[in-house]
Structure formats: C-alpha cells, structure tokens
Amino acid sequence: MSDYPDNYSKVAKFFHWTIALLIILNLAIGVVLAYFEEFSRQIDLFSIHKQIGTMILFLVALRVIWRLTHHYPTLDGLLPKYERKLAYLGHFILYVMMFALPISGIYLSQSAGREVYWLSFKLPTLIAAQDQITAQQFVTFHKYLAILITIIVAGHVLDALKHLFIDKNQIMRRMLPTFKRK
C-alpha cells in the first residue's frame, strides 16, 4: 500500500481552486486597468487589483508549505514518463509565475512611490528607487508576466480537459471538488 493518496485533499483542492479563481479574476481586472484607465480610477480598481494580487501571493506561499509537508497523488502509471516530466515542469513554471507576478506588481507600485497594503497591513518596501523610468520598466515587466501566466494557465486548463475528455483518465477528476474514487 502506498503512502500517496489517489485523490487530492480538501485543503489542496481549496488552494487550487481559490488561487485559480483569484488569478483569473485579477487577470480580467488587469485588462480593464490597461484599457479603461479612467473607469478604473473611478472605482479604485488599482487597489482591488493589488489586494487580490497580495492575497494570491499569500495563498501560494501557504500552498507551497502545504505541498512540501503533505503527500500528493502520483502520476506514476497514469502518464508516460515524458508527459510526467512535462507536467512537473509546467507546474514548476506555474508556481514561479504565481510568485513572480504579484512580486513584480509590488515592485511596480513601490517604484512609482505608492505603498502596498494587504488588508490593513503595509507590506515592506522592496525597492528604494522611486522614479518614472523604473516604474515604467516594471509596468512592462508585469504586463509580460501577465501574458505569460495567461498562456501557462490556458495550457494547464487545456491539458486538464484533454485528460478528462480525450484520455478519459482520473488525473483531472482527482482535483475536482466532488470526485470520490470508488
């Protein structure tokens, strides 16, 4: 009998689906911020975007701690070796992006001279330089990271759907909230 479960825990599912929804929401808000700046200022979307971004950063940090301290279902026997390696690489890149995007947003705000808060807590200052050139560089960097994570998330979703509908294996079902293995 293996120490590895066949299904993801409720906590792992909570992290997965909560972070996924927050990322999608924040990407959508980011598009509105980019194309409807006046509207964004009127309803203070910048503040909402930063709050969600810092929430993502906090949840991803907790998720990494959870992942390092708990067993997860294995892909052994479900996928060929090359697909397992691609899955691990894709997940690694996704984790890097889930840290890089909110951190770049914090740098962006702070380089423009704006403080960043999460709930009512002021985040530590990560960058001392406060000038428009540095801020504009972070705007560009943040935008490209957002495009990259969008591509990675889309690939992740498409791959999950492939497992569900084409391969008809249990990989995606293990992460669905209602799935119970018989």
Image (cartoon, grey):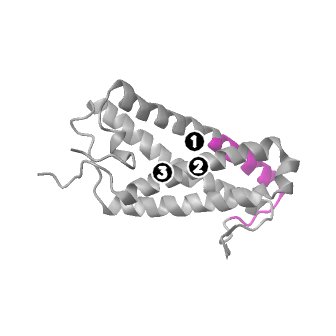
Q: Tell me the crowding category of disc 1: few under 14, some 14 to 19, or many 20 or more residues within 10 angstroms, Cα based.
A: many
- Which residue is tagged 3? 17
Mark 2, Cα crowd under 10 Å, few <14 / some 14-19 / many 20+, is many
Q: Which residue is mark 1?
A: 149
User: Which amino acid does the dot numbered 2 rest on?
Assistant: Ile
Q: Position of residue 27 (x, y in %)?
A: 65, 45
CB under 8 Å between discs 2 and 3:
no
| Distance CA(mark 3)–CA(mark 1) | 16 Å
Q: Residues in magenta? A: 127-146
Along the horizontal axis of the image, is 57 left or right of 16? Answer: right
Give the prevailing secondary structure in the magenta stretch. helix
Amino acid type, label 1: Ile
Classify 75 as above or below 104.
above
Q: Nearer the viewer, mark 2 or mark 3?
A: 3
The amino acid beneath tag 3 is Trp
Of helix, strand and loop, which one carries label 3? helix
The residue carrying mark 2 is 23
Residue 107 in view: no
Mark 2 or mark 1: which is in front?
2
- Identify the residue at image location x=80%, y=62%: 130
Give the SS element for disc 1: helix
* Residue 170: image location, x then y, percent: 30, 37
